Amino acid sequence: MSDQPHDAMTPPRTLLRVERGEAGRVLRELRAQDFVFTVLEREQPSSRLVRIRLSGNGFLRTHAPYPTMWVRLWFADRSGTGAGHQRAYTLVDPDVPTDTFWLEFAIHDGSATAWALGAQPGDQVEASLYGSEPSLPGCDDVDHHLLVGDLASLPAINSLLDALSPAPTTVVLEWTRPDDRALPVRVRDGDALRWVRRERDGGALLDAVDEVLADLNQLGDPALGRTCRGDRPNLLAVPADCPRVFAWGACDTVTTRALTKKLRAAGLAKNCVKTLGYWLPSTQTAALTG
């Protein structure tokens, strides 16, 4: 389903202000920048996802986009009290000349989903920019990329796949419903994609990462009769034929903490690991970025 695009010259509908509460006060003290975006069109490519194209109303003309860039949107609580809360979403396919971009909403029971499902061309939404930063590798000579996430972080993973070097990339994605696996993942020739069903509160995803790391540790020069595995596996170790790996991960907060420890234990340098908790497992809602 796709709604007709909104003509940029059409007067926007009334913006309903959201009471931001304590979170808003903190962001103001941190000098977060505020914006208003306008809905241009909406589409629903699957039962699990809503995509909305928005006008930044000048946002992209003053803030150059980068892979994994995200913004915080403000939504009113459905109780009707006017109380609001924030959810953050990755910019998808930002286009600076037209100052437009897409946001993708994983469907779950919450105020953000309710807004996305009902959004019409001309609707406006308040947004804040604070905390987003580039997530490309800070290490040199990367031989392999490892991207780990789920439906909430898929937009960020796709933005990385568009920007990473041609080095092979392994993508490990967690799914909860079968049609999650039908969503587009922008893997390239030579990349590997592995879908893992969510089990044991993220445990199955971590097991899959273990398997990928073990495979990378086995890489080496067979002619020399050696691999990268040793008493203490280290993906950045000498000999030089061991691969240098950049890893990026964003899952629920608990799984992300375990993933970070696992990647560090594998020997990846601090500047070769980028992780961020995207949602709270206690609520099953996107809590930080989408």
Image: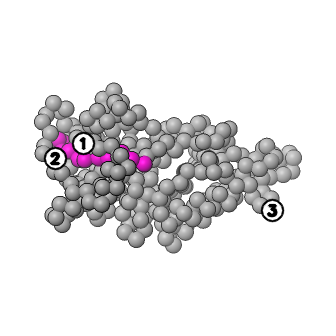
Above or below residue 214? Residue 91 is above
Of residues 109 and 189, the one nearer the viewer is 109
Under mark 2, the amino acid is: Leu
At x 16%, y 46%, the residue is 15
In percent of width and height, residue 125 lies at: 23, 47
Q: Is disc 1 surrounded by few (<14), some (14 to 19) or many (20+) residues within 10 Å?
A: some
At x 26%, y 60%, the residue is 21
Above or below residue 215? Residue 79 is below
- Secondary structure, mark 3, is loop
The answer to whether mark 3 and mark 2 are in CB contact below 8 A is no
The answer to whether mark 2 and mark 1 are in CB contact below 8 A is yes
Under mark 3, the amino acid is: Asp
Rounded to the nearest angstrom, the CA distance separating label 3 from label 1 is 55 Å
Inspect this view and state whether residue 46 appears: no
Above or below residue 270? Residue 255 is below
Magenta span of residues: 121-131
In percent of width and height, residue 273 lies at: 60, 51
**Which residue lies under the disc numbered 2?**
15
